[in-house]
Image (cartoon, rainbow, N blue to C red):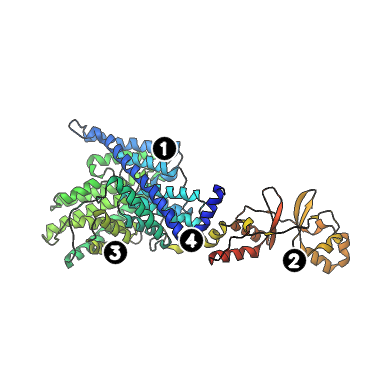
Amino acid sequence: MTFTHLQKRFARLLIINGYLPKIFLAAIIGFATGLVAIAFHKSLEWATAFVFSPWVGENALPWWSFAPIPAVGGLLVGLILFKITKTPEASGQGTDNMIRAFHYKGGKIRRRVAPVKFLTSVITLSSGGSAGYEGPVSQIGSSVASGICRLFRMPRSLHGIFTLAGTAAGLGAIFKAPLAGALTSVEVLYREDFESNAFVTSIVASVTAFTVYIAFVGSAPVFAVGSVFPFTNFYELLACALLGVLCAPFSFLYVKIYEKTEKRFAKSKVSNALKPAIGGLFVGLILLVYPEVAGGGFDFVGKLFSEMLPTTIFGILLLLSIALAKIFATAFTVGSGGSGGVFGPSLFIGGVLGAAFAGAIEMVFPGLLRVPEAMILVGMGSFFAGAAKAPIAGVVMVCEMTGSYSLLPGLLMSAVMHIAFSRPWSIYKSQVLNKFVSPAHRGDLDQDVLRIVQVKEVITNRKFHVLRAEDPLLGVLPFIDSSSIYPVYENENYLGLLDMSILRNTYMAAPGMVRHLQVSDCTVKAPLLLDSLDLHAASKIFVRLGVSELCVKNSKGEIVGTLSHSEIFKIYDKIVSGKRENSK
C-alpha cells in the first residue's frame, strides 16, 4: 500500500465516520503547535533581551536613542516579507489573515507562512513594535494545521475545521487559556455566530498545545494577581456595566484609526518593503513620550495591579493618554504591514481604561469598589469582547489568564454592554455576519464527499465492442444494444461515442438512409474519463456535456469501464448515509 493510498484512506475515514480520527488529528496539530509556541516564546524572550540590553542596567543608553529601533525592525520585516520570501499574507494581523483564509481559501495557507510569520513577528515585537503575540501564534498554528491537512489531502470543509484547531492551539498555549483559545477560534469568524462544527477539534488541539506549552514554560497564569474578586454588590455590577459602555468610544477609535492607517499605507506609492519601516518610525516617536506601549505591554498592565491606582485627574488623564498612544502605535505597527496581532493591544487598552475608570470611581465615591484593581481585568475582557465581537471568548480569556472565575458576573455584564454599543464595527475586517453569508459554507457537503472517491472505485468493468469510424453503419447494427455505449476509433485514435439519439432519429425519419451512413456520421465527441479523477470533477464533466454515461481509461490510455451520471448520485447517497461499501 503506497503512501498516497494511505493519505486518501485517512481523508475518507475522516469524512465518513471519523469522530475519533478527527480528535486524533486535532491532538497531533495541538502537539505540533505547542512546540512551535514554545519556540516562539523562547525566541521572543531572547530577542527582546538582546535588543533592549543597551538600554538597561547601570550604563544604560538614554531612552531617546531607542527611537530608531522600531524603524530598523520594520525595515527588516518589510524586506523579509516583500523582497526575500515574497509572503505578503504574513504581514499585518495574523488572526484576521486566518479568518480570511477560512472564509475565502478553504482554510488553506501556504507552507512558507509559518516560518516567515514566526521570524517577522519576533523582529517586530522585540524591536519595540506595538502588537500582540496572539496574531502571530494563531496564524502560525493555523499554518501548521494547514500543512498537516495538505499532507493528508483533506477536503475543503475539514481543512477549514483543522485550520481553526491550529488557531485554537496557538491561542490556548501562548495565553495559557485552553478553553478561551478554542472559543476564540470558533467565535471570531462571525459577528453574530460561531463555527460549532470546529469546537470539539479546537478543544482537543488547544488542550494538547496548552499541556505541551506549560510543561516547558510553567503553569503560572499570565496575570498572577493573587486576589479573589467576588461580585455580590449591586453597585459593583453597575460599575462594570458602565465600564462596558465607556469602552465603546475607545473601541470605535481603535478600529477606525487602524482601518484608516492601513488604507493610507495601502494606497501609498512607497514600496511595500519600506512601509513597515515608516510605521516603525512613527512608533519610535510615540515611544519617546510613552515607552509603556512598546511590545505587548503586559508588563505595564501587571504593574497597575501592584501599584496604587490613580486618584487624581492628572493620573486618570495620563492613563487615558497611554491608551490612545497604544491605539496609534498599534495602527502604525500592524497597519503599515508589520507582523503582529491586535488582540494583545486590545487587552492592554482595556486594562488601562479599567484602571482609569477605577481611579475615577475612587476619586468620586471612595470605598464603593471593594477591590478597585478588579476593573483592570473587567476592562480587558470587555474591550476585546466588543472590539472583536467575541463576548464569550473575551470573558473566558481573562478568567483563565488570571486563574480565577470569580470575576465572571462582572465581566459578562461589561462585555454585553460594550457589544450593545459597538455592533457596527469590529477590529477583524474579514469577519462575516454569520454562516449563511460565509463562502466557506457554500456547497461544502457535495463537493467534499465526492472529492474523496476516485472514478476507478465505482466504475462498471466490462468488455467493449469497439467500432471503427469508417465502418458502414448498416454492418454494425446487429451488434448494437441501445442501452449500451460504444467507443469509436479512427486510425487507432479515440474519436468519441456512438450517439444513439442520432441513430434512432435517422432510422425513424428515413430508414433507407442508414445504408449510406458510416459510424463516424453518428459519432459524438465525448472525452474519456481518467480513472484517477475524483467524482466531483467527473460530475462537472457530465453536467458540461449533458451526457448520461462515459467511458473510463486508465493511465495507459486503455478503456477499462464506464461511469454513469446516476452512479455518482448513488455513491453520494451511500456516503452521506454512512452505508457505502468499499467496492470496485
Looking at marks 3 and 4 on the same chain, the residue that comes earlier in the sequence is marked by 3
Residue type, mark 3 in image: Val
Could you tell me if residue 360 is visible in this image? yes
| Mark 2 or mark 4, whichever is nearer to me | 2
User: How far apart are labels 3 and 4 at the CA level?
Assistant: 28 Å
Q: Nearer the viewer, residue 365 or 341?
A: 341
| SS of the residue under disc 2 | loop
What crowding class fits label 3: few (fewer than 14 Cα within 10 Å), some (14-19), or many (20 or more)? many
Looking at marks 1 and 2 on the same chain, the residue that comes earlier in the sequence is marked by 1
Looking at marks 1 and 3 on the same chain, the residue that comes earlier in the sequence is marked by 1
User: How far apart are labels 2 and 4 at the CA level?
Assistant: 39 Å
What crowding class fits label 2: few (fewer than 14 Cα within 10 Å), some (14-19), or many (20 or more)? few
| Figure quadrant of residue 478 | bottom right
Q: Would you say the residues marked 3 and 2 are in contact, meaning their CB atoms lie under 8 Å apart? A: no
The residue beneath circle 1 is 80
| Figure quadrant of residue 513 | bottom right
User: How far apart are labels 3 and 2 at the CA level?
Assistant: 66 Å
| Mark 3 or mark 4, whichever is nearer to me | 4
Q: Is residue 564 above or below residue 280?
A: below
Q: Would you say the residues marked 1 and 2 are in contact, meaning their CB atoms lie under 8 Å apart? A: no
User: How far apart are labels 1 and 2 at the CA level?
Assistant: 63 Å
Looking at marks 3 and 2 on the same chain, the residue that comes earlier in the sequence is marked by 3
| Mark 1 or mark 2, whichever is nearer to me | 2
Task: Judge left or right: residue 297 versus residue 185.
Answer: left
The residue beneath circle 2 is 483
Q: Would you say the residues marked 1 and 3 are in contact, meaning their CB atoms lie under 8 Å apart? A: no
| SS of the residue under disc 1 | helix
Looking at marks 2 and 4 on the same chain, the residue that comes earlier in the sequence is marked by 4
What crowding class fits label 1: few (fewer than 14 Cα within 10 Å), some (14-19), or many (20 or more)? some
User: How far apart are labels 1 and 4 at the CA level?
Assistant: 34 Å
